[in-house]
Image: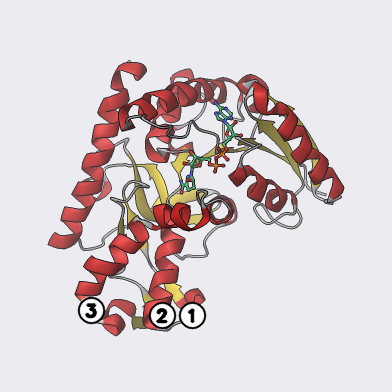
Amino acid sequence: AKAPVRVTVTGAAGQIGYSLLFRIASGEMLGKDQPVILQLLDLPQAQKAVKGVMMELEDCAFPLLAGMIATDDPAVAFKDTQVALLVGARPRGPGMERKDLLTENAKIFTVQGAAIGQYADPNVKVLVVGNPCNTNAYIAKATATKFGRVKPGNFTAMLRLDHNRALSQLAAKSGRDVSSLKSLVVWGNHSPTMYADYRYVTSNGDNVKALINDETWNRDTFLPTVGKRGAAIIEARGLSSAASAANAAIDHIRDWVLGSNGEWVTMGIPSDGSYGIPEGIIYGFPVTTANGEYKIVQGLEIDEFSRDRMNFTLKELEEERAGVADLLA
Ligand code: NAX
C-alpha cells in the first residue's frame, strides 16, 4: 500500500471545508489508492466545530483516511505537509474597505507562509482559496520562500472555479457537452476582472467561438456572467459558493498531482514573465501538468481585445500587491 500523504486544510470548520474534506478523504483528490492524513487548522473558537466535522469523517469509515488532527497552531498544521489547501480567510465585514480586507488577510497569510516555509515538506503543493486568493498566495509565497526550503512555484491560487464556470456557460451557449470542451483559459485575478478567453476552445475539433459566432455575447453576456457569478450565487443562496469552490479545489490539486494528460487547465501561478506578465505576480495562466509539475502553454497570440483585458486584471493585481508591500518589507 502507498504511504499516506499529509494534507493540510485551513478554515476546516467553514462551509468550503465541509464540502471539501469528505471528498479528499474518499480519494477524489489524490486517487482511489492514495491514503491521506488530514491536518485541520482553524481558529481557537472554531475547534469545537472542527471536532464535529472530524466525528462525521470518522462516521464515514473512509478506507483511505489514515489519520487526522485538529489544531489552531499553524506550526502543527503545516508540519511535513505535502498538500496545503489554504481556505480559511477573513471575510469582508460590514463597512470594511477593500484595503482593510487586504491587510487583515495579509496578516494571516504572512503567519501561514512562515509556518509553511519552516515546517512543510519542501515539495509541498500549496493552493490558496481564501480571498483575495491571488494576493494571499503572493504573500504566503513571499514569506515562505525567505526560509529557502520551499520554491516560489509551489504557491498557487484558485482560478479553477472561474474556469469551470466559463466552461459551463460555453457548453450551454454552444449546445455542446461540457466534457467535449478543450483549451479554455482564464487569465489574471480571481475577481470580476478575470478574463475568460474562449478563442482557442474546441469541441470535437470545432472552434467554439466560430460556432457561437457572436462577439457581442462574449463581451456583454459571457464575460460579465462569469465575472459576477460569485455575487449571483450569494444573491440566490444567501451564502457564497461552497460546494463548487470545493469541487474546483479538488480539480486543481488532482490535475497538478496526477496530470492533465496534455489538456489545458487554468492555475493561478507565479508569472515567469510569459505573455508580458511581470515576474512573480500570481496570475491565471493556461497550463498543462505532468509528473507533479505545471508548464505554461506558450505561443498563444494575444489580440488587442485580449491584451486590454489581460492588462486590466493585471492592474488590479499590481494595486493589491502595492497595498501589502509594506507588510512584506
Ligand atoms: P467560512 O466563513 O464558512 O469559513 C472560513 C473558515 O476559516 C472559518 O471556519 C474560520 O474560522 C476560518 N478561519 C478564519 N481565519 C482563519 C485563520 N487565520 N486560520 C485558520 N482558519 C481561519 O468561509 P468559506 O465559505 O468556507 O470561504 C472561505 C474562503 O474562500 C473565503 O475567503 C472566500 O472568499 C473564499 N472563496 C474563494 C473562491 C475562489 O474561487 N478562490 C470561491 C469561493 C469562496 O468565495
Q: Is mark 3 within 8 Å of ligand 1?
A: no
In the image, 114 versus 130, the foreground residue is: 130
Image position, residue 136 (x, y; %): 42, 33
Q: Would you say the residues marked 2 and 1 are in contact, meaning their CB atoms lie under 8 Å apart?
A: yes
Q: Residue at x 77, y 33 (%)?
A: 51
Q: Would you say the residues marked 3 and 1 are in contact, meaning their CB atoms lie under 8 Å apart?
A: no
User: Is residue 91 at all visible to an observer of this figure?
Assistant: yes
Image position, residue 263 (x, y; %): 46, 65
Look at label 1 and name its amino acid.
Asp
For residue 178, above or below residue 267: below
- Within 10 Å of disc 1 (Cα), the crowding (few <14, some 14-19, many 20+) is some
Look at label 2 and name its amino acid.
Ser
The quarter of the rendered structure image containing the C terminus is top left
Q: Residue at x 35, y 47 (%)?
A: 191
Per the image, the residue denoted by label 1 is 177
Dot label at residue 203:
2
Image position, residue 63 (x, y; %): 84, 51
Look at label 3 and name its amino acid.
Asp
Q: Mark 2 against mark 1, which lies toward the viewer?
A: 1
- Within 10 Å of disc 3 (Cα), the crowding (few <14, some 14-19, many 20+) is few
Per the image, the residue denoted by label 3 is 214
Q: Mark 3 against mark 1, which lies toward the viewer?
A: 3
Image position, residue 175 (x, y; %): 42, 84
Q: CA distance from mark 3 to mark 1?
A: 19 Å
User: Is residue 79 at all visible to an observer of this figure?
Assistant: no
Tag 3 or tag 2, which sits nearer the N-term? 2
